[in-house]
Amino acid sequence: MSLSSADIAHLEAVLAQGKKPKVVFTDAAGQVAGRTGKVVGLDPEGVDDFVHVAFGSDELSFSAAELRLPAPGESARRAPRQRSNAPAAPAAPSGPGLLPDEPAPKPEPAVSERKPVTVPEVTPSAAAEAAPAPKKKAARPRAGAVKHPELSITLTYEDGEWSVAATRGARAVVKGAKVAHPNALAMCQASGSDEVAEVVDEVVEKIRSEAAEEASRLRRQLEEAEARLAELK
Protein backbone atom coordinates (compact mmCIF):
# COMPACT_ATOMS: atom_id res chain seq x y z
CA MET A 1 0.00 0.00 0.00
CA SER A 2 1.06 3.63 -0.47
CA LEU A 3 -0.35 7.01 0.41
CA SER A 4 -3.69 7.69 -1.19
CA SER A 5 -5.35 11.05 -1.82
CA ALA A 6 -7.30 10.65 1.40
CA ASP A 7 -4.09 9.84 3.31
CA ILE A 8 -2.43 12.96 1.95
CA ALA A 9 -5.42 15.06 2.98
CA HIS A 10 -5.19 13.50 6.46
CA LEU A 11 -1.47 14.40 6.69
CA GLU A 12 -2.23 17.98 5.65
CA ALA A 13 -4.88 18.26 8.36
CA VAL A 14 -2.52 16.94 11.05
CA LEU A 15 0.28 19.28 9.92
CA ALA A 16 -2.15 22.21 10.08
CA GLN A 17 -2.64 21.41 13.79
CA GLY A 18 1.10 21.83 14.37
CA LYS A 19 1.72 18.09 14.76
CA LYS A 20 4.07 15.78 12.86
CA PRO A 21 2.22 12.61 11.78
CA LYS A 22 4.06 9.29 11.53
CA VAL A 23 4.46 7.32 8.29
CA VAL A 24 5.97 3.94 7.44
CA PHE A 25 8.43 3.40 4.57
CA THR A 26 7.25 0.87 1.98
CA ASP A 27 9.40 -1.58 0.02
CA ALA A 28 9.77 1.05 -2.69
CA ALA A 29 11.85 3.10 -0.26
CA GLY A 30 14.72 0.60 -0.28
CA GLN A 31 16.73 -0.10 2.86
CA VAL A 32 14.50 1.97 5.11
CA ALA A 33 11.48 -0.21 4.29
CA GLY A 34 9.41 -1.00 7.38
CA ARG A 35 10.85 1.82 9.41
CA THR A 36 9.02 4.97 10.47
CA GLY A 37 9.52 8.71 10.24
CA LYS A 38 7.67 11.95 10.89
CA VAL A 39 6.17 14.12 8.17
CA VAL A 40 7.40 17.72 8.49
CA GLY A 41 6.00 19.18 5.27
CA LEU A 42 4.13 18.58 2.00
CA ASP A 43 4.85 20.08 -1.40
CA PRO A 44 2.64 18.22 -3.92
CA GLU A 45 2.87 20.83 -6.70
CA GLY A 46 4.54 19.15 -9.69
CA VAL A 47 7.14 17.22 -7.66
CA ASP A 48 7.29 13.43 -7.31
CA ASP A 49 9.08 13.45 -3.95
CA PHE A 50 6.78 15.92 -2.24
CA VAL A 51 6.55 14.41 1.25
CA HIS A 52 9.31 15.72 3.53
CA VAL A 53 10.05 13.14 6.23
CA ALA A 54 12.39 13.49 9.22
CA PHE A 55 13.91 10.27 10.55
CA GLY A 56 16.85 10.06 12.91
CA SER A 57 18.98 13.16 12.32
CA ASP A 58 18.11 13.40 8.61
CA GLU A 59 15.29 14.93 6.61
CA LEU A 60 14.57 13.74 3.05
CA SER A 61 11.77 13.92 0.48
CA PHE A 62 9.83 10.85 -0.63
CA SER A 63 7.07 10.05 -3.09
CA ALA A 64 3.60 8.77 -2.16
CA ALA A 65 4.54 5.26 -3.36
CA GLU A 66 7.39 5.06 -0.83
CA LEU A 67 5.21 5.84 2.20
CA ARG A 68 2.07 4.60 3.92
CA LEU A 69 0.17 5.31 7.10
CA PRO A 70 0.97 2.98 10.03
CA ALA A 71 -1.57 0.31 10.81
CA PRO A 72 -3.30 0.42 14.23
CA GLY A 73 -1.00 -1.13 16.87
CA GLU A 74 1.93 -1.35 14.47
CA SER A 75 5.20 -1.12 16.41
CA ALA A 76 7.62 1.52 15.22
CA ARG A 77 11.21 0.76 14.58
CA ARG A 78 13.98 3.29 14.73
CA ALA A 79 14.84 4.89 11.41
CA PRO A 80 18.45 4.83 10.19
CA ARG A 81 20.55 7.99 10.24
CA GLN A 82 20.72 8.40 6.46
CA ARG A 83 19.09 7.07 3.32
CA SER A 84 21.41 5.14 1.04
CA ASN A 85 20.76 2.57 -1.71
CA ALA A 86 24.38 1.34 -1.72
CA PRO A 87 24.91 -2.17 -0.18
CA ALA A 88 26.79 -2.37 3.08
CA ALA A 89 30.47 -3.26 2.76
CA PRO A 90 31.24 -6.87 3.79
CA ALA A 91 33.05 -7.33 7.07
CA ALA A 92 36.74 -8.07 6.72
CA PRO A 93 37.74 -11.60 7.82
CA SER A 94 39.77 -11.83 10.98
CA GLY A 95 42.15 -14.40 12.38
CA PRO A 96 45.77 -15.49 11.95
CA GLY A 97 47.24 -16.65 8.68
CA LEU A 98 45.34 -14.13 6.49
CA LEU A 99 47.17 -12.03 3.94
CA PRO A 100 47.26 -8.33 4.63
CA ASP A 101 44.75 -6.24 2.73
CA GLU A 102 46.01 -4.85 -0.52
CA PRO A 103 46.10 -1.08 -0.56
CA ALA A 104 43.27 0.49 -2.48
CA PRO A 105 44.41 1.72 -5.91
CA LYS A 106 44.79 5.46 -6.09
CA PRO A 107 42.37 7.13 -8.45
CA GLU A 108 44.01 8.36 -11.59
CA PRO A 109 43.90 12.13 -11.98
CA ALA A 110 41.35 13.32 -14.46
CA VAL A 111 42.90 14.59 -17.65
CA SER A 112 41.07 17.49 -19.18
CA GLU A 113 41.30 18.06 -22.86
CA ARG A 114 42.49 21.51 -23.70
CA LYS A 115 42.01 22.99 -27.09
CA PRO A 116 44.85 25.06 -28.50
CA VAL A 117 44.22 28.78 -28.40
CA THR A 118 45.30 30.82 -31.36
CA VAL A 119 46.80 34.15 -30.33
CA PRO A 120 46.43 36.80 -33.02
CA GLU A 121 49.68 38.31 -34.18
CA VAL A 122 50.08 41.96 -33.19
CA THR A 123 52.37 44.11 -35.26
CA PRO A 124 54.52 46.78 -33.53
CA SER A 125 52.55 49.58 -35.21
CA ALA A 126 49.21 48.16 -34.04
CA ALA A 127 50.57 47.73 -30.52
CA ALA A 128 51.73 51.34 -30.50
CA GLU A 129 48.29 52.53 -31.57
CA ALA A 130 46.49 50.39 -28.96
CA ALA A 131 48.78 51.36 -26.07
CA PRO A 132 47.63 54.51 -24.24
CA ALA A 133 49.95 57.47 -24.35
CA PRO A 134 51.96 57.87 -21.11
CA LYS A 135 50.81 60.68 -18.90
CA LYS A 136 53.27 63.49 -18.34
CA LYS A 137 53.88 64.48 -14.76
CA ALA A 138 53.32 68.11 -13.95
CA ALA A 139 56.59 69.96 -13.49
CA ARG A 140 57.20 71.01 -9.92
CA PRO A 141 58.53 74.53 -9.31
CA ARG A 142 62.11 74.60 -8.16
CA ALA A 143 62.95 75.89 -4.75
CA GLY A 144 64.93 78.80 -6.20
CA ALA A 145 62.17 79.79 -8.62
CA VAL A 146 60.63 82.34 -6.19
CA LYS A 147 61.69 85.81 -7.32
CA HIS A 148 61.97 88.64 -4.82
CA PRO A 149 61.91 92.34 -5.81
CA GLU A 150 65.26 94.08 -5.67
CA LEU A 151 63.93 96.78 -3.33
CA SER A 152 60.63 97.06 -1.47
CA ILE A 153 59.66 100.04 0.74
CA THR A 154 56.55 99.87 2.95
CA LEU A 155 55.00 102.86 4.72
CA THR A 156 52.83 101.98 7.72
CA TYR A 157 50.56 104.04 10.01
CA GLU A 158 49.71 102.45 13.38
CA ASP A 159 48.77 103.83 16.80
CA GLY A 160 49.17 107.45 15.62
CA GLU A 161 52.69 107.01 14.23
CA TRP A 162 54.18 106.50 10.77
CA SER A 163 56.96 103.98 10.16
CA VAL A 164 58.84 102.72 7.13
CA ALA A 165 60.38 99.30 6.37
CA ALA A 166 62.66 98.34 3.48
CA THR A 167 63.70 94.96 2.13
CA ARG A 168 66.29 94.18 -0.51
CA GLY A 169 65.56 90.82 -2.08
CA ALA A 170 64.79 88.45 0.78
CA ARG A 171 66.84 90.45 3.31
CA ALA A 172 65.29 93.14 5.53
CA VAL A 173 67.30 96.38 5.39
CA VAL A 174 65.13 98.68 7.55
CA LYS A 175 62.60 97.57 10.15
CA GLY A 176 60.01 100.02 11.50
CA ALA A 177 61.92 103.28 11.24
CA LYS A 178 59.76 106.17 12.49
CA VAL A 179 58.78 108.86 9.95
CA ALA A 180 57.49 112.37 10.70
CA HIS A 181 53.93 113.10 9.70
CA PRO A 182 54.76 115.72 7.01
CA ASN A 183 57.37 113.40 5.45
CA ALA A 184 54.91 110.51 5.42
CA LEU A 185 52.29 112.65 3.68
CA ALA A 186 54.87 113.82 1.15
CA MET A 187 55.76 110.18 0.37
CA CYS A 188 52.09 109.35 -0.16
CA GLN A 189 51.55 112.36 -2.45
CA ALA A 190 54.66 111.42 -4.45
CA SER A 191 53.03 108.11 -5.40
CA GLY A 192 50.58 109.98 -7.68
CA SER A 193 47.85 107.39 -7.01
CA ASP A 194 44.27 108.51 -6.45
CA GLU A 195 43.52 105.37 -4.41
CA VAL A 196 46.47 106.08 -2.10
CA ALA A 197 45.41 109.74 -1.76
CA GLU A 198 41.87 108.72 -0.79
CA VAL A 199 43.08 106.32 1.90
CA VAL A 200 45.58 108.86 3.23
CA ASP A 201 42.85 111.52 3.47
CA GLU A 202 40.82 109.16 5.67
CA VAL A 203 43.83 108.59 7.91
CA VAL A 204 44.61 112.31 8.11
CA GLU A 205 41.02 113.09 9.05
CA LYS A 206 41.23 110.53 11.83
CA ILE A 207 44.50 112.08 13.06
CA ARG A 208 42.93 115.57 13.10
CA SER A 209 39.93 114.31 15.05
CA GLU A 210 42.12 112.63 17.64
CA ALA A 211 44.36 115.71 17.87
CA ALA A 212 41.31 117.98 18.37
CA GLU A 213 40.04 115.81 21.19
CA GLU A 214 43.48 115.78 22.80
CA ALA A 215 43.70 119.60 22.54
CA SER A 216 40.25 120.01 24.07
CA ARG A 217 41.22 117.76 26.97
CA LEU A 218 44.44 119.66 27.57
CA ARG A 219 42.54 123.02 27.56
CA ARG A 220 40.18 121.75 30.22
CA GLN A 221 43.08 120.60 32.34
CA LEU A 222 44.79 123.98 31.87
CA GLU A 223 41.63 125.83 32.88
CA GLU A 224 41.28 123.69 35.98
CA ALA A 225 44.92 124.31 36.92
CA GLU A 226 44.54 128.09 36.45
CA ALA A 227 41.41 128.07 38.60
CA ARG A 228 43.28 126.38 41.45
CA LEU A 229 46.08 128.91 41.16
CA ALA A 230 43.53 131.75 41.36
CA GLU A 231 42.11 130.29 44.55
CA LEU A 232 45.57 130.22 46.16
CA LYS A 233 46.19 133.97 45.66
Image (tube, rainbow, N blue to C red):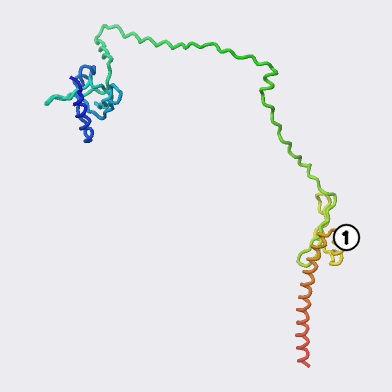
- Residue drawn where x is 75% and y is 40% of the image: 141
In the rendered image, the quadrant that contains the C terminus is bottom right
Residue furthest to the bottom:
233
Residue 159 falls in image quadrant: bottom right
Residue of label 1: 190
Question: Where 55 sits versus 206, above or below?
Answer: above
| Secondary element type, mark 1 | helix
Viewer-closest of 188 and 46 = 46
x, y percentage for residue 72? 12, 26
In the rendering, at what x and y percent does residue 142 appear? 76, 40
Residue lying at 79% horizontally and 73% vertically, measured from the top left = 211
Give the residue furthest to the left.
Answer: 73
Count residues near mark 1 (Cα–Cα under 10 Å), then give few for <14, some for 14-19, many for 20+. Answer: few
Residue 106 in the figure: left or right of residue 211: left
Note whether 167 is above or below 20 in the view shown.
below
Q: Is residue 131 left or right of residue 35?
A: right
In the picture shown, does residue 172 fall above or below 70? below
Residue 21: image quadrant is top left
Query: Amino acid type of disc 1?
Result: Ala
Residue pictured at 82% horizontal, 63% vertical:
178
Which sits in the foreground, 227 or 190?
190
Image coordinates of residue 169 in percent, x first then y, are 82, 49
State whether residue 122 is above or below residue 21.
above
Q: Quadrant of residue 79?
A: top left
Quadrant that contains the N terminus: top left
Question: Would residue 121 appear left or right of 34 to someone viewing this image?
Answer: right
The percent coordinates of residue 212 (x first, y second) are 78, 75
Say how many tags the image has.
1
Q: Which of 66 and 91 is in front in this view?
A: 66
